[in-house]
Image: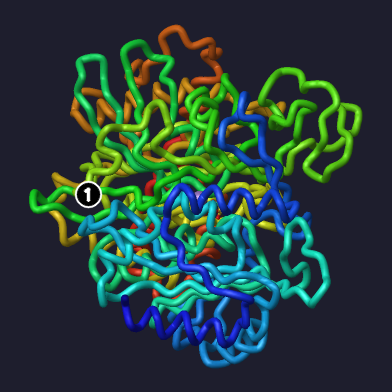
């Protein structure tokens, strides 16, 4: 037994005062026991075995439906280390505050000890953490999303681990019944102590707030470790792309939450002979291999995907992945106990119960599922999971895509001129906000590298780290960087690009650029497909629409410069010189193009 772990568990139990402590072994019997607890406490409903074997259906408290960025803190020694894009709190003050909140917070509940591995157990890239939680929903979800249990403790030995303490913040008094979704509707804190590799999360039971291996560990804490150790912890899907001749390349792609990472990772190409297989849908840890190439692993073992919009049309592979062993949260329920959500089928089934437990029909005038409703399923069930997905050495990355939801300005695809220019494009990523985080939806914000909510340190230093990683590598072996945008709209507000399986056309161009067979034209913003080099054969998109999708909007970009400048001003003096140079160079190229026009 790891002595530090034992001492910490004892100490935490004394603070939180649970009725008992259970060490999780990671067995299927334990998973079943969690499902039983969830059903008996009224949190979950078991789904009919004939429809969704071994699956449950859960509805959360309406006050606990998404990540709470406002209450997410990076408690580094100084405010400057957390940087201008994070909420900072003094670590000592926050510890004192949290000690008060955690004191007695597990009364009437069980404290579970979950040893977990992010990455295949024993892989040199994997990292171990332990989450202490009073939520059986978290235990069940962690079984799916990570590798958990005794196997992890064996590998851990007396080694170091990330400490994650989680409580729903809802102690139970004697004789008081539990609520179906315990949480603290008023007080939530998701706190990270990067210097000591600790996480403390209070008051929420939902998603990235509570499954601490995911965003808190694999991104916020890991990004700091990656900076210190010279690798990259990124908010990226990983896919394997194979051409009709059987040649394969691996692509990583960063998009903000709820912008289609899962759909792209499992895409069914419309182009004949092309194949996409999934390595991961949310997080990539990337390190250089002995051959000088960048290798990526998916540290997770499951998918925690956005349900609404997922259908046999938009993502048939996800639909097949969720046929069994699934945990559904905040979807609508059908009369026979199955799930439904917006766009799953053309017409909704009759007599739905919505996520708020109310009768629902299209006439209700509201959505049946919460827009951040989720499915949680083992990745191994995905029918297009790549055979390399658990390779401890990772997969060599040939291209990195950045993107977001942008109705205007950003073209369909744009290849960076260099690693430094690609880093620049990542640093100015912007996207319309989604329901994955609490707050307004559809507001345009800068979300550099899709890491705005997930970077555990100063964003300027993070940019510098990206430049350093590139500068230290063999440029010829670095992945090429591309900026994509599936979401450009016409004047009437309609999407210009059909998206989904048709995105394989863009992937094909990326693949052929990497292989050196597709032509590009150099423009002031980067390299765009030369006329005819993007395969639009059989695509029912009007020629005018293609022109608009690939138009370099000099005016729009020029207007954008002021916003980028403001965004950079906010990053402050730690913004690396290389990016200031890229900004100037872009400004000059745009001026030149404007003068010629
Ligand atoms: O709730 S999560 O943070 O796990 C999902 C997301 O926002 O990407
Ligand atoms: Mn995500």
Q: How crowded is mark 1: few (under 14 residues within 10 Å), some or many (20 or more)?
A: some
Q: Nearer the viewer, residue 404 or 39?
A: 39
Disc tally is 1
Residue 520: image location, x then y, percent: 29, 28
Badge 1 element: loop
Residue at the farthest top position: 538
**How are the colours assigned in the image?**
rainbow
x 57%, y 19%: residue: 313
In the depicted structure, whether residue 180 falls above or below residue 23: above
Residue 169: quadrant of the picture: bottom right
Residue at which label 1 appears: 392
In the depicted structure, whether residue 556 falls above or below residue 95: above
Q: Nearer the viewer, residue 270 or 561?
A: 270
Q: Nearer the viewer, residue 414 or 32?
A: 32
x 26%, y 42%: residue: 480
x 83%, y 72%: residue: 175
Residue 182: quadrant of the picture: bottom right
In screen coordinates, is 413 left or right of 410?
left
- Is residue 137 visible in the rendered image? The answer is yes
Residue 319: image location, x then y, percent: 54, 27
Residue 494: quadrant of the picture: top right
In screen coordinates, is 347 left or right of 289?
right
Residue 259: image location, x then y, percent: 55, 41
- Is residue 556 visible in the rendered image? The answer is no
Q: Which of 303 and 286 is in front in this view?
A: 303
Whether the residue under disc 1 has CB within 8 Å of ligand 2: no
Task: For the N terminus, give its image quadrant.
Answer: bottom left
x 36%, y 71%: residue: 224
Residue 324: image location, x then y, percent: 53, 32
């Amino acid at each position: 037994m790891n002595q530090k772990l034992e001492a910490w568990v004892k100490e935490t139990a004394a603070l939180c005062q649970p009725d008992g402590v259970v060490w999780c072994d990671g067995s299927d019997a334990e998973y079943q026991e969690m499902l039983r607890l969830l059903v008996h406490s009224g949190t979950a409903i078991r789904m009919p075995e004939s429809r969704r074997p071994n699956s449950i259906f859960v509805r959360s408290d309406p006050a606990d439906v998404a990540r709470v960025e406002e209450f997410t803190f990076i408690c580094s020694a100084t405010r400057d280390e957390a940087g201008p894009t994070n909420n900072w709190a003094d670590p000592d003050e926050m510890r004192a505050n949290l000690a008060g909140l955690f004191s007695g917070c597990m009364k009437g509940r069980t404290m579970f000890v979950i040893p977990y591995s992010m990455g295949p157990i024993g892989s040199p890239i994997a990292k171990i953490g332990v989450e202490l939680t009073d939520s059986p929903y978290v235990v069940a979800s962690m079984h799916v999303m990570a590798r958990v249990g005794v196997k992890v403790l064996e590998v851990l030995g007396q080694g170091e681990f990330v400490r994650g303490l989680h409580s729903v913040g809802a102690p139970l008094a004697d004789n008081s019944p539990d609520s179906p979704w315990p949480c603290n509707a008023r007080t939530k804190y998701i706190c990270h102590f990067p210097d000591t590799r600790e996480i403390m999360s209070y008051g929420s039971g939902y998603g990235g707030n509570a499954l601490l291996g995911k965003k808190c560990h694999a991104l916020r804490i890991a990004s700091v470790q990656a900076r210190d150790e010279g690798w990259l912890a990124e908010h990226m899907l990983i896919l394997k792309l194979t051409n009709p001749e059987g040649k394969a390349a691996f692509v990583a792609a960063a998009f903000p939450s709820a912008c289609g990472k899962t759909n792209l990772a499992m895409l069914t190409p419309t182009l004949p002979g092309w194949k996409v297989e999934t390595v991961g849908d949310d997080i990539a840890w990337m390190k250089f291999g002995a051959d000088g190439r960048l290798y990526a692993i998916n540290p997770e073992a499951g998918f925690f995907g956005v349900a609404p919009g997922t259908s046999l049309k938009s993502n048939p592979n996800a639909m097949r992945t969720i046929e069994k062993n699934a945990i559904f949260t905040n979807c609508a329920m059908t009369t026979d106990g199955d799930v439904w959500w917006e766009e799953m089928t053309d017409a909704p089934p009759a007599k739905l119960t919505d996520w708020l437990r109310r009768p629902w029909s299209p006439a209700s005038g509201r959505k049946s599922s919460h827009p951040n409703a989720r499915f949680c399923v083992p990745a191994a069930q995905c029918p297009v999971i790549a055979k390399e997905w658990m390779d401890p050495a990772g997969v060599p990355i040939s291209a990195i895509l950045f993107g977001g939801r942008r109705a205007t300005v950003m073209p369909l695809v744009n290849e960076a001129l260099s690693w430094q220019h690609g880093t620049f494009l990542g640093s100015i990523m912007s996207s319309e906000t989604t329901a994955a985080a609490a707050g307004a939806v559809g507001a345009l914000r800068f979300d550099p590298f899709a890491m705005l909510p997930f970077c555990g340190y100063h964003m300027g230093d993070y940019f510098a780290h990206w430049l350093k990683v590139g500068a230290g590598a063999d440029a010829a072996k670095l992945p090429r960087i591309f900026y994509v945008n599936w979401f450009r709209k016409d004047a009437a507000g309609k999407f210009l690009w059909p998206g989904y399986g048709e995105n394989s056309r863009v992937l094909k161009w990326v693949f052929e650029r990497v292989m050196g067979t597709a032509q590009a034209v150099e423009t002031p913003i980067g390299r765009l497909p030369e006329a005819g080099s993007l395969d639009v054969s059989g695509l029912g998109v009007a020629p005018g629409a293609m022109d608009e999708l690939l138009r370099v909007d000099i005016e729009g970009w020029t207007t954008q410069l002021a916003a980028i400048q403001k965004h950079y001003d906010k990053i402050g003096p730690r913004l690396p010189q290389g990016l200031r140079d890229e900004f100037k160079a872009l400004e000059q190229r745009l001026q030149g193009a404007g003068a010629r026009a």
